[in-house]
């Protein structure tokens, strides 16, 4: 998932160039950088750290993948609203962002609240 976040860096710079040319709004370019890079990286680190520090396997579940895909779609939906002229796509972008972090809370909240599992290979 971190790779996807890094991939948004050049996409964000391309979006800034498009905003300079007047193709999309500058706020949309900022959205690609903030949601695409920062929020995606935050979510990736939070999922990895939670799994590692709670003794769970470092594999993404279906719910985790759905969370990543939702955030990916949220990052792309805002500039899409400018390109298509559909204002509801902007609202969908916000809803997808909320869904991504809601799925994180749903899956990882109990892991963070409940007793820590014993990591694999621990002899203590």
Image (cartoon, grey):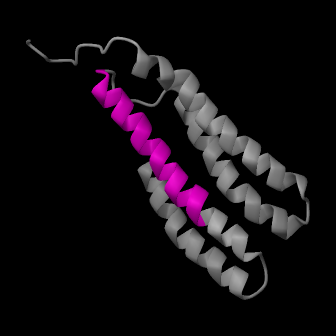
Q: Is residue 58 visible?
A: no
Q: Nearer the viewer, residue 91 or 1?
A: 91
Residue 39 belongs to the span the image colors magenta: yes
Residue 22 versus residue 24 in the image, above or below:
below
Task: Identify the image quadrant of residue 122.
Answer: top left
Q: Residue at x 68, y 49 (%)?
A: 73
Where does the image place residue 89, in percent across and percent down from the top left?
84, 53
Asked if residue 31 lies left or right of residue 13, the reply is right
The residue lying at 63 percent from left, 69 percent from top is 30
Is 117 positioned to the left or the right of 36 in the image? left
Foreground of the two, 32 or 1: 32
Magenta stretch, residue numbers? 33-55
The percent position of residue 106, horizontal first and vertical second, equals 57, 23
Please say whether residue 51 is visible from this viewpoint: yes
Q: Position of residue 96 (x, y in %)?
A: 71, 42
Quadrant of the drawing holding the C terminus: top left
Is 90 magenta? The answer is no
Considering every residue shown, the one lying at the far front of the view is: 113
Dominant secondary-structure state across the stretch colored magenta: helix
Q: Nearer the viewer, residue 33 or 63?
A: 33
Query: How far across and how far down the image is residue 44, in percent?
Result: 45, 43
On screen, 41 above or below 99?
A: below
Q: Residue at x 33, y 24 (%)?
A: 57
Q: Residue at x 62, y 50 (%)?
A: 72
Q: Residue 99 lies in what quarter of the image?
A: top right
Relative side of 85 to 73, left or right = right
């Amino acid at each position: 998932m971190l790779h996807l976040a890094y991939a948004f860096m050049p996409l964000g710079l391309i979006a800034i160039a498009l905003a300079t040319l007047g193709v999309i709004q500058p706020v949309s370019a900022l959205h690609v950088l903030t949601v695409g890079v920062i929020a995606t990286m935050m979510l990736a680190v939070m999922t990895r750290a939670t799994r590692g520090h709670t003794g769970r396997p470092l594999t993404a579940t279906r719910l985790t993948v759905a969370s990543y895909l939702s955030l990916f779609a949220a990052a792309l939906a805002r500039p899409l609203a400018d390109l298509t002229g559909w204002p509801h796509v902007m609202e969908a972008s916000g809803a997808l962002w909320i869904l991504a972090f809601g799925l994180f809370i749903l899956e990882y909240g109990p892991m963070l609240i409940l007793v820590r599992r014993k990591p694999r290979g621990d002899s203590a």
